[in-house]
Amino acid sequence: MKDVSNAYEALIAHDRETQALAQIAGRLGWDQETMMPRGAAPQRAEEMGALEHVIHARRTDPRVGEWLAAIDESTLDQVGRAHLRHIRRSFERKTRIPAALAGELARVTSEAQGQWAEARAADDFQAFKPVLENILSLKREEAEALADGGDLYDALLDDYEPGATGAELQAMFDALRPRLVALRDACMGAAHQPETLTGQFDPQKQMRLARELARAFGYDMSHGRLDKAVHPFSSGSGLDVRITTRTSEDDPFNCFYSTIHEVGHACYEQNIDRAYLMSPLGQGVSMGVHESQSRIYENQLGRSAAFTGWLHGRMTEVFGPLSVADSQDFFGAVNKLHPGYIRTEADEVQYNLHVMLRFDLERQMLSGDLAVADLEEAWNTRFEADFGVAVDKPSNGCLQDVHWSVGLIGYFPTYSLGNVYAGCLNEALRADMPDLDDKLVAGEAAAVTTWLSDKVQRHGGLYEPKQVIEQATGKQVSVEPLLDYLEAKFGAIYRL
């Protein structure tokens, strides 16, 4: 096998079929969250487990190692070397995980999604506790296989943000926390407080406007669709990228900004160079970079004074006169700080504080320092200390997020890393496009997001995560642009 002259071509052909199967698995996951009958969950778990067995076998096929060994990288161009980097990283990680464990994780986490949803609806953490204990046990086993004696959390984190470490993220959070807490306290205690939008907003009208917003930000509906789910998400890549949102009759911002957020993820996938389709480069390079796109779409662009002015006009046309009549007051209403329980509904100032809580708790659970049986109490105690509000029920506490139920340990900190990346990108974007607000005030967000497509999205997995951001901005990654942006924006809103 080592003498095969077309090792690279054979490797890429093999990987393309594996990518296709992974896309099918993703489509099954999308269906499970949107269309699948509730009673089908046990069968779907078996289907997902069986498919994962096949995908795992392909990713750990001994021929992959032989092809990698036979290829002379000096004969490859930049794209070819990037293909090898991703395939080698995947092969080395996957070959450390026993096939039986990979299949069991897929089966258990698929079934756990429905169990989590039922426990959340019933506000019954005890019903979900044994499920989470099983998932933690399996993830710890996976981490031990990957870590090779190293840090267990870092081993799992590498799936979502290659090259990042828990220690680096802890340093990032330590740099963010003091200024975020000080800004939060100043805003909450300010004499001027923004108005709150009140009223009832027809869910069907919300969905129609959500589709308009998706198109305004450049989402290609001919290669995607917008549906409703309990927890909004984006799924797929290339020619089939689907998004979901949710509606609440008394909170249309939940629908609109969940949609814009997921559009950021989806546009990243849709705008990757089509030459990378169905290859290791055909997806976003990391969850941190992915989150940078969703957060800059949602916050720096979607919640800007310029764009909210346009949104105020459209909402008035769709729903009639609003309780907040002035567009500048509406900007304040969109960005108003509130002591809410839910991470996905948190304002920009407090969002990262929600992530820090999860980051600390999941590290403690993985290490064994925190038993799952003690999670609910630990969550509630930490939440009240951080936010000054007592958690009233599990669905507002440790059962609010789907992530742990599907085994995504190490995923949460990438949300904050994405916010930091978005701060860096926003600084560079505004320097390059001094007329940015003129476009946003006319609802022309797609014209603005072309910059992001060119600087970030089209590259897919060609570069390493941090390299993507530093090439786009011409600067090293820092928390300062995000903190400076937040202090300037909310200082103006609250007249600090």
Image (cartoon, grey):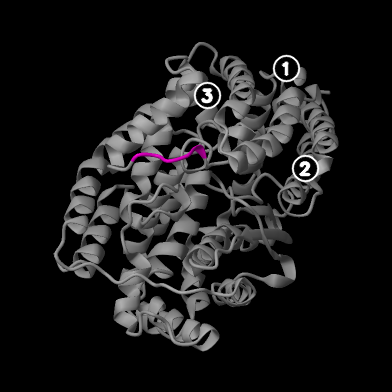
Q: Answer left or right for 41 relative to 440.
A: right
Residue 93 % position (x, y): 63, 25
Residue 392 drawn in magenta: yes
Tell me what residue is drawn at x 20 percent, y 42 percent: 178
Q: Which residues lie in the magenta part?
A: 390-394
Disc 1 from disc 2: Cα separation: 19 Å
Tell me what residue is drawn at x 33 percent, y 56 percent: 338
Tell me what residue is drawn at x 67 percent, y 52 percent: 235
Picture quarter with the N terminus: top right
Residue 158 % position (x, y): 52, 31
Amino acid type shown at disc 2: Ala
The residue closer to the viewer here, 337 or 280, is 337
Q: Dot 3: what SS?
A: helix
Which numbered disc covers residue 98? 1
Residue pointed to by mark 3:
155
Amino acid type shown at disc 1: Pro
Residue 327 drawn in magenta: no
Sequence-wise first label, 1 or 2? 2
Tell me what residue is drawn at x 56 percent, y 46 percent: 285
Q: Is residue 350 above or below residue 138?
A: below
Residue 122 % position (x, y): 61, 39
Q: Is residue 355 above or below residue 482?
A: above
